[in-house]
Amino acid sequence: MRNRQSWADRLAQSTPRVIKPIPEKMAKRLGPGSMVVPSPADVDAVIRTVGKRKLVTAREIGASLARRYKTTVCCTVTTGICAWITAHAAHEAELLGKPRITPYWRVLKPGGEINGKYPGGLAGIRKRLEEEGHVIVRQGKRLVVKDFEKKLAVI
């Protein structure tokens, strides 16, 4: 039986970032240009810059990476996957007693929704955000940070 790779290993041995032309299907919507496909380490570095009481979404992370690598856009699907890897690696580091971890709980879905797929689930993420002073409201089945737009980090 094969040993599972730790999340920290997945983060450290991640695939390199790729800069390529925007795919044809996307170019119809976005126009011509270049796209960065980030590595988990790239996304981890951006999330680490988000300070206390600040929030970020995959869209802001992608925009930051596109500016950094001077491309037109960033692949948001890959950014979301990399953020998920980063969250699990940070949780793993926390369980090992490391004092500083990537603040994955500050990464929200579009519209300010809490991502229940991150370690700790909805309850754990909600608790961390409320400890930082954010107000969480229920919108139907979703948990959303109230006025999250005003709290977005400038990255």
Image (cartoon, rainbow, N blue to C red):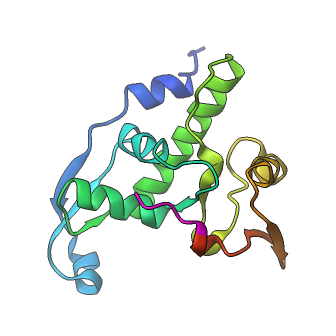
Residue 88 rendering spot, x and y as whole percentages: 61, 36
Compared with 142, 19 (above or below) is above
Can residue 102 be seen here?
yes
Quadrant holding the N terminus: top right
In this rendering, position of residue 75 left or right of residue 131: left
Closer-to-camera residue (99/5): 99
In this rendering, position of residue 123 left or right of residue 75: right
In the image, is residue 68 part of the stretch drawn in magenta?
no
Q: Which residues are the magenta region?
A: 151-155
**Which residue is painted at 37% across and 26% down in the image?**
13
Name the image quarter holding residue 91.
top right
In this rendering, position of residue 137 left or right of residue 110: right
**Which residue is painted at 84% across and 79% down in the image?**
140
Residue 107 rendering spot, x and y as whole percentages: 58, 55
Tag count:
0
Can residue 75 be seen here?
no
Residue 55 rendering spot, x and y as whole percentages: 58, 59
**Which residue is painted at 59% across and 41% down in the image?**
87
Q: Residue furthest bottom?
A: 28
| Magenta residues, dominant SS class | loop
In this rendering, position of residue 112 left or right of residue 10: right
**Which residue is painted at 79% across and 65% down in the image?**
135
Compared with 117, 70 (above or below) is below
Closer-to-camera residue (155/18): 155
Quadrant holding the C terminus: bottom left
Residue 84 rendering spot, x and y as whole percentages: 56, 46
